[in-house]
Structure formats: C-alpha cells, structure tokens
Amino acid sequence: MVWFDESRLDDQVALGSADLRLRTLAEGGSRVRREVDAAAEAVDEAVARAADARARAVIAAGPDSRLLRAVLEPVCPVPFVAWPSPALPGWAGSLDLVVVLAPDGGDPGTASAVAEAARRGCQLVVAAPPNSLVAEHAGGRWTTILPTGTGDQLAVAVAMLSFLHRVQLGPAADPEAVAQALDDVAIACSPLRDISINPAKMLAISLADANPLVWGGSVLSARAARRIAESIRRTSGRAALAGDAEHLLPVLEAARPRNVFADPFEEESGDRRPVLVLLDDGVDDDLAHADRRRLEDAAAARDVRVEHVATEARGDVARYASLLLRGTYAAEYLRLGLVPD
C-alpha cells in the first residue's frame, strides 16, 4: 500500500534524495539562455540565407515537432505542417523551409528526415548537437545547424523560434521572457520554500488522493496539460488524463458521490475520485471560457475539487513554459511524498 506523507515535502533529508531532479527543473531558465546564446551566430547565418525569398511552406520535421506546431500553426503566414514521421511530404522541395528540433541528436528517424530534406535541396535549419547523428546527416548547401548542448526540448525550441520570428514566419518569442518565467517558477516552487507558500507543494498535496484531470483552453495550455499529465503518470504510476472539455466531462459526470466518512488511504486506487486541474494562460476566448464553465459546473455538481494554475508571464511561449514547469514541480513533489506503507 502506498500513502502520501506531506511532511516529506519539507524534510531536508527527503528533499536531498530528490535534489538532482529538482535541480534540473530549477535550471530551466539557464538552459534557455545557454541555448539561445550558443545558437546566435548560426541564427544570423540562417536569417541571411532566408533573406532572398520567403519560403513557400514550413515543415517541422521529427518527433519533437509538436511544440513548434502548437506555437506556429495559428499564426504562420505560409502553409505549415508538422511531420513527425522519418520522412518528408512528397511535395516538399527547394522552395520550402524544413526546421528540425533534435535536442539529443540521436534519433535515426529524424536523421533520415534531415537527410531527405538535404537531398531535395530544401532550406534546412536543424537544432542539434554539432557532432550528433542528426547533424551528420544534415550536411548540404542550404543547411544551417543551430548547435545545442543541453538536451532540453523547450530551450532548443526557443532558439528555433527566435530564428522563425526574425524571418517573419513565427510570433515573437522573447528568450529572456521565457527564461525569466522559468526562473520565477523555480523560485516560487523551490524545495526551500515551506508548504504554506509553495504552490507546487500545495498542488501535489491536492493530487495525493485523487486522479487528476488536466485541462487547458488554448493550444499551448492544452499541450502543457498533456505534458503535465504525462509527468504525473510517470512519477506516481497513477491515472492522469488531459484532454478537451468533451473528453473530460464524462469522467467528471461519472464520479461517484463523495463519502465524507471514507478514509482515502484505505480505498483501492481505482476508486480514487478525480480532481480537476485548470490551466489558465490568460488566453480566454469565448469557446475556452464556455468550456471552462462547463467543466467547473460539472465538478461542482459532483463535489469534485478544482485546482487553478495560472501564470502572469509575458508572451505565449513564456506562459506555456511557466505552466508546464509548475505542473512538473508538482509531479516531482507528488513522487517525493508517496511512500510504501
């Protein structure tokens, strides 16, 4: 049997056992700064190459392309497609721009995609470690390598988005704003801060006896919701769902009535009630607002607890980074507090 010991979240010995994971989270802002600084010269080169003519279309290739899709798809002024398979669309050619995120640079499928892009003469910008498998396959006349070294997908994506903004194919993504947003979360959620003033520890306690349902109303907050649910599943082994309102509403409506006399630690894991986690990045159009109200009303009708996670960071990518890091901290504190009986 596993139970949650919240005293471990302020216990220095217990926190020491999670020091490496928590330190990695706290260094997110510095990784963004390092990646952007390291790629600055290569970005200038890529911008100069792209100055002659705007690309006919933008293809984000490789399995890490989904974050670029979430940022670019609503605003890119030319056709945009995310292509995670180890190949390219049949129509891709010399008039098109292929961008690739390969933080570790070792994926054979991504290497195959960049080799195909180089063979077809596409404009190719690849963010990867310089001596990696992907970089070796990307050699070509129209190729630019943005050197990376942290293995951090978000940091690498910010460097690529800086290039895309400069060639007027993407929105402004101020790297310093993203880094500062990550630093602010790291300070607020630091293991040195007491439970009573630490939002990530408080969220972990709220998740301790429940199965989380995570929702975000915008494209980027919905992606953050999926990533946070993945982190919770990985750290706790519990069911955690993320999805659109129509996917989460049936789960809320099927929640069993709360038994005020029940001891949650004596119940089987399959009987845990849901907790609704709403991510708010400030992008609240009419549809998102209506969906939020439907979820809150369904939760109230079944006496399901609701947790709100908000951010005041500047810029879409910075708000995404802030929400994601807050949820990831909560997942790590959940891992720390769960102990076998």
Image: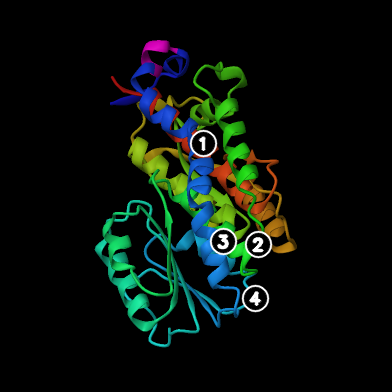
Q: Secondary structure at mark 4?
A: loop
Q: Nearer the viewer, mark 3 or mark 4?
A: 3
Q: Using the rendered image of the protein, determine whether residue 257 is visible from the camera's viewpoint.
A: no
Which is more N-terminal, label 4 or label 2? Answer: 4
Q: Secondary structure at mark 1?
A: helix
From the image, tell me which residue sits under label 2.
Answer: 171
Specify the amino acid type for callout 3. Phe
Q: Residue 148 versus residue 229: which sits nearer the camera?
A: 148
Tell whether position 13 is magenta: yes
x%, y% of residue 62?
37, 66
Specify the amino acid type for callout 4. Pro
C-alpha gap between disc 3 and disc 1: 19 Å
Which is more N-terminal, label 4 or label 1? Answer: 1
Q: Residue at x 52, y 16 (%)?
A: 192
Which is more N-terminal, label 3 or label 2? Answer: 3
x%, y% of residue 237?
32, 39
Q: Nearer the viewer, mark 1 or mark 2?
A: 1
Sort mark 2 into few (<14), some (14-19) or many (20+) by Cα contacts within 10 Å: some
Q: Nearer the viewer, mark 1 or mark 4?
A: 1
Q: Residue at x 34, y 68 (%)?
A: 138
Q: Residue at x 51, y 36 (%)?
A: 30
Which is more N-terminal, label 2 or label 1? Answer: 1
From the image, tell me which residue sits under label 4.
Answer: 77
Q: Residue at x 60, y 47 (%)?
A: 175
Residue projecting furthest to the right: 286
x%, y% of residue 329?
48, 33
Q: Secondary structure at mark 2?
A: loop
From the image, tell me which residue sits under label 1.
Answer: 30
From the image, tell me which residue sits under label 3.
Answer: 163
Residue range corresponding to the magenta coloring: 11-15
